[in-house]
Amino acid sequence: MVLKTVVYLFFIILGGTIGYLYIPYIINMLDFTDAVWATSPYFGMIIGAIILFFISYWLADYIVGFLKWIEDALVKLPAVDLFFGSLGLIVGLVISYFINRPLQDINIAVVSQLLPLFIMILLGYFGFQMGFRRREEFVNLLSKKERDKRKPQEQGEEEVQTPKPKSKILDTSVIIDGRIADICQTNFLEGTIVIPQFVLGELQHIADSSDALKRNRGRRGLDVLNRIQKELPVTVEIYEGDFEEISEVDSKLIKLAKVMDGIVVTNDFNLNKVCDLQGVPVLNINDLANAVKPVVLPGEELVVQVIKDGKEHNQGVAYLDDGTMIVVEEGRNYIGKTIEVLITSVLQTSAGRMIFAKPKLLEKAQ
């Protein structure tokens, strides 16, 4: 294994260097022998190389495992995250260099040697974290500047460029719901469909749940994503980044929408309200479904099947084909039957639409 060989070679060189510099000094100090060859730096180099070579047999596997872990983490890290993290690290190290230069002139060992090392590590860490955690803001800032530079340069140019549609960011609830795939198929959603990695993680967690209902909902959501990505004529982007300082998935979605200047697509009533409060554009699938439902007005007649009891006394409940609930007053006696009803009122809310009606037979009897 090449990596293990490199580790062995590193330990041999390190041992030889330490032995060359310090073993003759240790032998002279302890007065082991008067032999000239024992105090030779080359003898110390050989002894040091042999000692650290044997030590490397115990440590090599752990060191190789640690290096492999770092390698895998770097390979999995998105290029944008790695670039801005490295850029922040470089900026931190440059700042620490200018801070440490005056400290090296001080004759106190702790200040001139240990303190610069501490400052270098600290500023390097803070620089990396700053670049890594705020990478989305930097990308958005650079994109905005690039868009500003693309203004028409020729005077009198009348052609107006069509603005690029904003990205649509899907949340977990709308993916599990499934209707988003049909909406994408009809080309009602413009722009790129963005699926954040943290939403995929939540879906996978639901799909692995011990509860059968949650497990089925999670698997259905994954099937919907597979259909959107492979079968539908839309551009799908998997957002690999994460906001580690934020724990809630809904809060991460709102933060991502602000960073990307995108639109959240959901059918979660509460998330819809939070987006409105924070000024984040949002598309609610339930609002779209309510908008395309057939319009019914008080006084119209419908033929429905009464299915079950209502909440109030002597009420019955029926449903239209699109799922709209109809509360039939005095309809309890007609459960299981198909009857004509007369609409009395329609209640429209963001959560859905509810229709109130009464049997037409009762209207005629009156």
Image: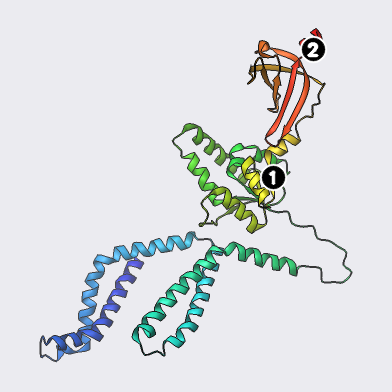
Q: Which residue is mark 2?
A: 363
Q: Residue furthest top?
A: 365
Q: Residue sitting at 50 percent across and 61 percent down?
A: 77
What type is the residue that disc 2 sits on? Glu
Q: Where is residue 55 shown, x and y percent of the image?
A: 23, 70
Is residue 308 depicted above or below 150 in this figure? Answer: above
Q: Residue furthest right?
A: 156
Q: Residue sitting at 26 percent across and 69 percent down?
A: 56
For the residue pair 327 and 174, the one nearer the viewer reads as 327
Q: Where is residue 7 shown, x and y percent of the image?
A: 32, 70
Q: CA distance from mark 1 to mark 2?
A: 41 Å
Q: Where is residue 71 shown, x and y percent of the image?
A: 43, 63
User: In this figure, which colouring scheme has been used for the structure?
Assistant: rainbow
Neighbour class for label 2 at 10 Å: few (<14), some, many (≥20)?
few
Neighbour class for label 1 at 10 Å: few (<14), some, many (≥20)?
some
Q: Which residue is mark 1?
A: 283
Q: Where is residue 277 shown, x and y percent of the image?
A: 67, 49
Is residue 252 depicted above or below 157 in this figure? Answer: above
